[in-house]
Each structure stands twice: as structure tokens, then as C-alpha cells.
Image: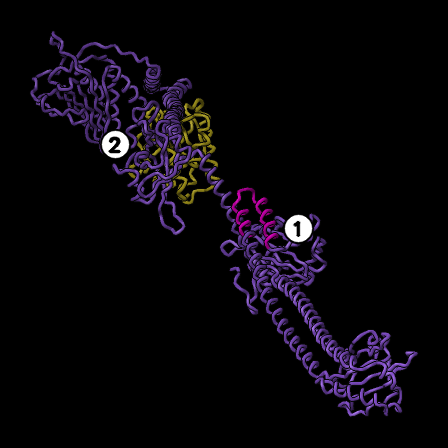
Amino acid sequence: MAQRILIIEDDPMNAKLFQIVLTRKGGFQVEVTEDASYVLREVRTGSVDLVIMDISLSNSELDGKPVDGLEITRRLKADPGTRQVPVLLATAHAMKGSREKFLRESGADDYISKPIIDSGELIQRVESLIMKGSHVVPPADR
Amino acid sequence: MSITMGPSGAGAAPAGLGGRQLRGATAWRYLAGMSLTAGLVGLAIWGLTARTCEQLRAESRIKVASIAATIAAGIPAEEHQTLRSREDERLPAYQKLLAHIVSARQANAGVERVYTLGRDPAGKRWYYVLESGVDVSGSTRARVGDGFNALAKPELSGALLGPTADRGPTAKRSGALITGYAPIRDRSGGTPAVVAVDVDAHAALAAERRFRAGAKIAYAIALLGIALAGWTSYRRRLQEIERARSIQMRLSIHRLTEVMTRTGSEADMVKSALEVIADGTGYAHWALYKRNRERGTLELFATRGLPEEAHGDLVVDAVDMAAHSPASRAALRGEAVIVRDASEIPPYDFAAGCRGLGPDIAVAAVPLTDHGETTAVLQCFAPRARGFCPEDVTLIRWMASQLALGLKRIQLELRDQLLASYMRSTQEILVGFDMDGLVTYANPTAERALATPKNRELRGKCVDELFSPSEGSGGTSFLSAVRAAGNFAGDVNCHRPDGTTFPAEVTASKALDRDGGVSTIVLFGRDVTERRDQEAEIRSRSEQLLLINEQLQHANAKFASTNRMKNEFLANTSHELRTPLNAVIGFAALIEQGATDVEEERRSFARSIRESAEHLLTVINDILDVAKVEAGRLEVELENGDATPCILTTVDALRPTAVRKGLKLSAEAGPEPLNMELDPARMRQILLNLVGNAVKFTDKGQVRVKAWREIEQSEIRIAIEDTGIGIAKDQLPRVFVRFSQVDGSYKRRHGGTGLGLVITQSLVERMGGRIAISSEGLGTGTRVTLAFPMSPAREDGSSGSGTAVAGKAEAARPREMDMIPPKLPTAVRRET
């Protein structure tokens, strides 16, 4: 069974692109959403192998308040039931120092900046993260 | 102390210097004088007595001699010569001659015995011839020719020359007889015999004794007189001495006082005073020590009668319990210390080899006190033999107290001089005035400041003429202010007689006199004209500096904020560019790599590329617009026209989005044409941005656009209201700031660069309008109002679509542009 990747992305074009690339080239099962609470719930079920997280989110909310990708990642990493699932930040915020800043602030496992020139690299990073995540902390219910 | 001058009785001790010694010496002198006088008087009386007795005897002798001579005259020498021996007693001559002498004896009272003595021709032997009878002693009568011891009668030889007598009775001789002799002369003038007459001398002797007794009594009386006279004189002399001494003391006291009051240095004063004291007391050797309160020691200040080399011997030590030198002990105890023998104090070894001081000395140390506190010690050295009697000590103490007064006076004088010089030389205005406000003292500075050459005198003026409280006094005068509060500290205006004034800062306070009462108020102050000017200048400069500082801070903050916002803007711009680029690159790669063979899908990828690129273009245009706003080169081409079409087309353009979000989007305008100077494209851009935002930030409810004419302000108003998330009050001021987003975080990015409002505001302003944004806070919706100057309607009437019936409700419309727009009776409504 193909690994399941959850993508949080507000830009429809980019969402579409992620879906096509990861499905066609990587052979992953991909789901795109902007619903933050859904993400938290879904990852908790253990059915998600990797989360690709955009940072700037226009329409995502938690508890009635707008949230960004960093906040969702923090929640995932704070919860023992979800923290073992790797999170890859994929964002167009790519100023100098952004990578370190975002990783530190959110606790995410990796960072890739947009535009992604080489989709092969994306797939490679995703696979590597999934491998690492399953080795280090095997999901309890699998 | 008091100086006793009164008559000094035997018991009362006369006061004064060396009284005892002087009295002793005088007494001895008087005693010697009196003894001498008594001796002389005694001698005189004795001499007188002896002479008188001699005279008496001489008279007796003459009388006896004359008796003898008378008897001798009655005896014929030739007859008498015949009688030479006992045999001759038978001769008649003998009988005759015997009868003669017996009768002669009887004839003269007092004659005890008459006898004659014959002399042999050789003259070597005397012999009895006749004898009147037995004398009282009862001895036997001598017989003619009996030998007579002539050696026992030296007078006999004298009797040969004439009548004479012996000296009469003496102590050696028994009986009280005086014997007279007289020669019995013959015709040839020879003296062959002598008549001797023994006369009873008892009476003469008694007279003599009586005289001598009288003389003794007289001598005794004389002695008594001498003693009385001597005592009286002695007492008078003593009184004289006392008087002289008291005069001398008074004189020395007077001189001391005079020295004390003389102005001069302290050292000179002390030097003169010691001279006077030495003179007045008779003691020659003095030292004065001054107490050093800080060090707790006595220090030698001056000496008198002591050579320089003796100074080292004037040992003094600390004034404490262990003090052993007389001066230190006196200072410690505060009373006179008398040491009769200085060698009794082992460490005190004053080897005074000075004139007048023997090897053994006595020391008197007397403290000089001021209000019970020892300030100095006066020390006197004396030969031990003389020592110090109580009167001396008293006098020294008195002198010391005078000296203390003098020292104090000179100190006070120096202090007064110092104070006076302070007052004279200080740059402070110093004015003293009494309780009636009359000036009693003004120092030269005060006179310079407050008086004029014409009107120089300040004394006697009222302080209210000179000073008035500068402000906040409620019209009360300076004097009443001082009286009310008891003092005054603050600013006053000073008035010169010529009417000019100057500001001064003064303090006035009561000057307590000795009894704690208040009779004077003293005022200190200074002219603060210059300082006020300086202060004003400083104040204005500091205000300037503050202003500059504020501006700098403001500029700095603005710079920092601008810088931060620029960085933010750059980050956001980068993000906004990268996001569509990701899609462009990604889809292009998919096509390139032949990710799909399906033609339809390939087209979809290409469409995605195009849409993303278009979005990219929008972003770029926005950025360019902002750059133009920044550079002030936002191009606006104004023409007179109706804004209504712009409003309607914009709302139409946004309707699909609103429909997708399930929002109600409405526009109300007219009915009159909204004529104004406008650039239709820019107007559309403005509205697109504002209405777009409203739609973007509203998830449910509605977005309403209203436009109307505000006749009174001659303005076209356009309001965009939504029921969206609103803006927090504290964020409102930031919405028009360039490069800023309402929230600095990443979570509320609803697309766009956050530049929309900035560009919009700039465009509105370029069209001569204003923009206002209001919100009651998060979740309460937002309302944006635009106001543009109204321009007259075009004469051709082609005011565009949407014009209809003219309303009459203008007058009722609210003036504030933030107010809710009026309900229009007729309006062009386009609703979803």
C-alpha cells in the first residue's frame, strides 16, 4: 500500500501541482486540505506517513482563530500521538535564515523552499523522511 | 571675689598681696623702733634722775660744807693746834672748843656729830682733836690724838683747800650720813686742821628715793605711751600699706581692664595682660596655656618672666583623668590647683633657673573659664618660700577671670569683625528689619542693589517699599507674608527708588535674640535677573533640544520601522512572487517531462501556468505601483465624470467571487450623477481593492457599497461595508502604513502583498479625496469611506447609467463621512 501524504496548501495551483507530482512520480497517496483541525485529527489516526506543510495559510483556522503552518506543526509536535509523523515545510518564504528560523520555531523535520525546481529532489526528501520516521519511531498501531 | 579694704583688726586677715609677709616685716620694724624709743627714753629718764640726784646731793654737800665752814670759822686754829694728845684734854682750850662744837652740833638740826681732825706738820698723819659726842651708832667718842684713817676719806685733801663734803651715803656705807669738811685756817693761811660734820642724810636719801620712784613711774608711763603710740602708728601704717596696695591693685585691675579692651592681636593682648598681672600681683613668673579642644591638650601660648629655654620645662599634658601637670589638672577640674612644692609631682620637674625663682618652686594653676568650660589656664610660679596665700590665689583667680573675659572679648571681636567682613563682602543682599518692617540694617550689596545715588539710605524704610512677592501671593504684602508664616522663601520683585525693579530670590527668617525672643527678621537674597535670563535661554534651548531629540527619535523610529517594514515587504514580495512561480515551474516541468499523454490534461497544465503567470503579473504591478507611490509618481489622469459606472462595473467584476463564498454583494448609487474629477481606471482600481478586500475578509453575511452626494460639504461619498472579520482597534492606525500588513505573522495572509490599502490611499489622495477606515474591532465588520470633491454636473446630462429620480433627502444626511450612509429613496441596486 502506498504511503499516505497529507498536504496543507492554500494556493490551489500549488496544491494541484503537489498532488500530480507526488502521485504520478512518487506513487504516494496524496490528500490536500486547508482544514487545520482535520489535519490534527487525521495524523492522530496514524494513517498519515508524512505531512507537507505550507506556512502562509489564508483560510485555515483552529478554535475560531486563524493559524499558520508553523502553529499547526507545533501542535503536531507537541502531541505524543502525532509527533513521530515527519513534517516537511514547503514554503515560498525563502529569505536568508528562513530555513533555520522555521525549523526551530515549529519543530518540523525538514524544509524545502518554493519554487521547487527539481521535483525529483522533493520526492527524494519525502521518501527519506518517511524512512527515517518509520525507523526511529515505529507507529504504535501499525 | 571681693577685695577687702576695711580696717584690719587683730583677727581679721587683711586682704591682698603678701599681706602676711608685709605685716610681719612691718611689725618687726615697729617693734624695733619702739624698743629703741623705750631704751632712749629710759636712758633719758635715768640720766635725768641721776643728774637730779647729783644736784640734790651737791646741794646737801654745799649745805653740810657750809655748816662745817661755819663751825670751822668759830675755832681759832692756834688754840686748836695746841691740842695734840689725850693729856691736852685738860687744857681749858679743849673744853672751850669742845663746848663750841657741841653747841654747834646742837644748833644745827640734823647734825649728828661734829669733830675736828688735826694734821701733823709733816702732813702725813691725821688725828682726832675734838668730838661733839657719840653718834647715833653709839660708837665711843674719839679722844684727842686718836688716829684717823685719811685714806678712807679722800675728801680730806680737798678740804684743805676749802669747805667740801663727801658723796654721801652709798650702798657700801652703812648709815645715812653725809660728812662735810671745812679747813681751820691759821693766820698764815695754813690749814693745820679740818672740821668734819656728820649730818643725817635720811631725808635727802628719802627724797632721792622718791624721785627715783617717780622717775620709774614716769618711765613706765612713757613705755606705755610709746607702745600705744607705736601700735597706733603701726596700725595706721598697715592701713596705709593696705590702702596703697588696694590702690595699686585697683590700678593694676584698671590697667588689666584697659589692656583687655585695647584692640590688637590676641598675643599682644595676652603679653600686656601678663605684664599687668605680674605687676599687680608681685609674682614675676607666668605662663598661659590655651586649651586645644580638638586634640584635648593644653598648649603653651605665652609666658612672662620665663626665659626661652625654660619653655621646654613647662610641661603640659592631655586634659584627661590621667593629667598630672598642675595646668592640666586645673583645666580638667575647672578649679585652681596649688602645688606648694613642685618637686612633689614626679613627672613635673620644672627646673626653673630663672631669676627670683629658687630651686624649690610653688605652682598655682588657675583655669580660665567660659560658661563653665575651661578655655585656658593661667599658671604662676613662685619661690617655695613665698608660696601662695589664699589672698594671692584669690587675686590670681580674679585676674584670670578678667583675662578670660578679655580673651573671650577678643574672640568675639574677631568673630564680629569676620561676620562684618562677610556681610560687607558677600554678594548676597542682606537686609535686617524689625517687626514693624522698618529696615535696621542693609549691607553694601543691598545698598548697591536697592538704593540709588540720590536715595542712598535704606535704613528706616519699610520692607514693603523694597520687596513684593512676585506671584501667587494673593496680593498680600511682603511683610504680611513674612509675618503670617514667620518666614519667607521664594521669589520677590525688588523695587528701587527710581521705580525700576529686578527679580530676586530671597529667604527671610526670624533672628532669635538672646532670650529667644524675636525682634529682628533677617533677609538674604540675590539678584536673579541674569540667572532668569540664562534660565530662559537654557529652557528655550532645552526645549529646542527636546524637540530636536524628539524629531531624531521620531526619525529614528520611523527609519527603524521603515527598515523593518521594508524587510517585511521584501519577504512578502519574495513570497508572493515565489508562490505562483512554483506553479509555473512545476507545471512547465511536468509538460516538459511528458508527465501526461492526455491532451486535455496537458492543456490544463498550460492553463495553470498561464493563470499563475497572470497572478505573478498582478503582483508585479502592485509592487510597481507601490514603487511609484514611494517615488511620488503614481500617474493619474483626471477628467470630469460620473463615478457611478466605475462602482457598478467593479461590483460586477467581484460578484463571482462573492457568490463562490456565499456572500451577498450589493451596490447602491444615485439617483443623481456622482460628478467629480476622476481617473476611471484608477477609480476602478481603488474600488476593486477595497471591495475585493471586503469580500476577501468576509466569510458570511454581506458586502455593501453605497455612493451618494454630500451636498453641504459638496462631496461625493462612497462607503464599503462588510460583515467580515474587522480590524482590531489598535491595528487601525497601521492600515495605511506602507509595507505593513495588519498582522505581522503568516497566518492571516489572504493573498496580496498587503500593499493594496497603501496604493489605494495614494490614489484617492491623487484624486483630491480622503479615505477613512473604521471598525468596532475583530469580528464586527469593517467600513471604508471615501470622500471626493464634487464637481458640477456636465451640461450634456450624459451622467452615465444608474441615474434616476432625484432625491430630496440631502438636507437630512449626516455630515460626518464615517456615518452610515442614508437610505436612498431610489437607487440603482445590483444585488447577488
Q: Quarter of the image holding residue A53?
A: top left
Evaluate whether residue A101 shows in this view: yes
Structural distance between the alpha carbons of marks 1 and 2: 113 Å
- Give percent across and percent down for residue B664: 18, 27
Tell me where the magenta segment starts and ends, as one range: B252-280
Q: Secondary structure at mark 1?
A: loop
Mark 2 is on which residue type? Ile
Q: Secondary structure at mark 2?
A: loop
Q: Quarter of the image holding residue B334?
A: bottom right
Evaluate whether residue A20 shows in this view: no
The residue wearing badge 1 is: B305
The answer to which of marks 1 and 2 sits earlier in the sequence is 1
The quadrant of the image that shows the C terminus of chain A is top left
Which of B703/A53 is in front? Answer: B703
The residue wearing badge 2 is: B725
Which of B96/B629 is in front? Answer: B96
Are the residues under badges 1 and 2 in a single subunit? yes
The quadrant of the image that shows the N terminus of chain A is top left
Query: Where A79 falls versus B32 (above or below)?
Result: above
Shown in yellow, the chain is: A
Shown in purple, the chain is: B
Q: Is residue B583 left or right of residue B204?
A: left
